[in-house]
Image: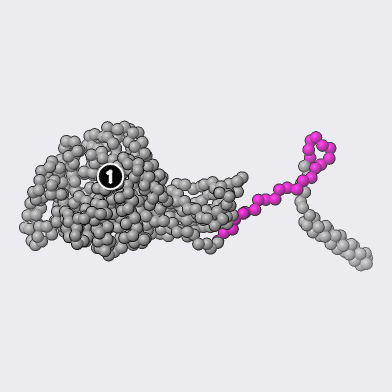
Amino acid sequence: MKKLINKYLTALAIASLSLISCAAQQQQQPTKVTVVKSSETEPVTKTPQPVEQPIITNDLKINLPEVKREFRAAWVATVANINWPSSKNLSTQEQKNEAIKLLDLLQNANFNAVIFQVRPAADALYKSNYEPWSYYLTGETGKVPSPYYDPLEFWIEEAHNRGMELHVWLNPYRAHHLSGGSVSSESMVKKSPSNIVKLKNGMYWFDPASIKTQDHVSNVVKDIVSRYDIDAIHFDDYFYPYASYNGGADFPDNASWNTYKNNGGNLLKADWRRDNVNKFIERINKEIKQEKPYVKFGISPFGIWKSGYPSGVVGSSQYDELYADAKLWLNKGWVDYFSPQLYWPINSQRQNFQDLLEWWQDENTMNRHLWPGLNTVEVKAPNRATEIVNQIKVTEKVLSKNSIGAIHYSIAGLTNNPEMVQALKNGPYKDKALIPRSPWITANKLTKPDLQISDIPSQLSIKWSNSSEKDVFQWVLYTKYENEWQIEILPKNERSKRLNRTQNGKKCNTIALKAVDRLGNESDYTVKKI
């Protein structure tokens, strides 16, 4: 019986080894699938197509080309319907069409920011919680657009869809402009008479010394910053008004001046006025950052601080006439960008563009952005386009290479002068540029984007995303054809693209991607080899 069991176990072991050997041989052979065709009597076998393998590699280390950085903006003035809307009686759709046309013009000329005036004179081109709808929008102060829309909201969305920043431009102290129709019951002149004075030219002005004025404008700014997805708050050059606005007479603020003196104030009147504005500027900067740290604060003061600064410069003094110590604001770093209105040509003897820009750059002790205002509409030069292009070249020489830029006053200098557009686009604005970084503003680091590439006939289909999507403002896409890099700056809402496998006889061999936040900070790159 024992022998019989041993024979049985031996046979079973041999059979098992035979089965294992057969299985191993079968694994070494290609798998065959039997397909029965109805028109044939015998089965047909064919080898299945192999699963498509990735044609890319990850986690490479490469040297990407540097992306140009330069601030390129234009002012869009709404006061007196200077730029937009072109008339105060346009329909909602006509207003939108005009806005799109202006933004398309800027995008096509490789601008990357627009400075949009939303508060020309204590009014609003947006749904304000503090001031009436603008006369320049509907032809009647306080009248709601119909069909309803929020112009600021519209401009923000359309600018961001084009990869452009939207800076909100406010006039802080002007209460009523001569072009703004009659002073109605909806006007702030009627609603807040205790801190608004009338000038001899017919304009109305908030008293900068009044706490009521300061609190009101502060509330307006905080309201905009909190409710709208803006990139910056921007003040222009109007603080205390130019003397000509009051017929050369002193600003009528005796009531607030007497209150100050009666309470023990010991500053001279001029110093007291400057102190009112200084405290206000410092306050606004702090309150913006408390609300949204990434929202920048910019000011575009009159281009001359005082006559004689720098030596040889002669002209009006913002320090003495507007009671605006703009040099102090720059020295203290109370702004994120500073745009003195240098509206004179390079070869001017009394107000030389380059001399003034160099002087302001020397005063930029906190290394904030210094982006001069250019008089693109009517600079006094034989050829405006050539002059403006040359002024931009001067900024590239004078300013820090990490913070080049300029602002054009106004967009009419482009809409009314095709030669200007072509000169910019064929010259200094030939390629797109990122906004310069603002390293003094802290920001969360962006995560590295996820990049997916699919092979399609003669093309590559690429898609991307980012886990910190809410902080992304733009993308930088790098494509390499043999040894030649190409760079594209894309708006945040673009998430896919198709690329030709070959271009000018060269094959695409590398694709890389970065995310960029609204302060110009870049993520680490994702790169894949083709």
Instruction: Report if residue 153 is visible in the image.
Output: no
Q: Secondary structure at mark 1?
A: loop
Segment colored magenta: 36-59
Q: Does the magenta portion include 425?
A: no
Amino acid found under the numbered disc labelled 1? Val
Residue at 24 percent across and 58 percent down: it is 356
Q: How many C-alpha atoms fall within 10 Å of the one at disc 1: few (<14), some, or many (≥20)? A: many
Count of all numbered marks drawn on residues in the image: 1
Image x and y of residue 211, in percent = 16, 53
Q: Residue furthest bottom?
A: 2
Image x and y of residue 256, in percent = 10, 53
Q: Main secondary structure of the magenta part?
A: loop
Q: Does the magenta portion include 39?
A: yes
Q: Is 502 on the left-hand or right-hand side of 144?
A: right
Instruction: Report if residue 394 is visible in the image.
Output: yes
Quick check: 353 above or below 498? below
Image x and y of residue 5, in percent = 90, 64
Image x and y of residue 93, in percent = 35, 33
Quadrant position of the C terminus in the picture: bottom right
Q: Which residue is mark 1?
A: 377
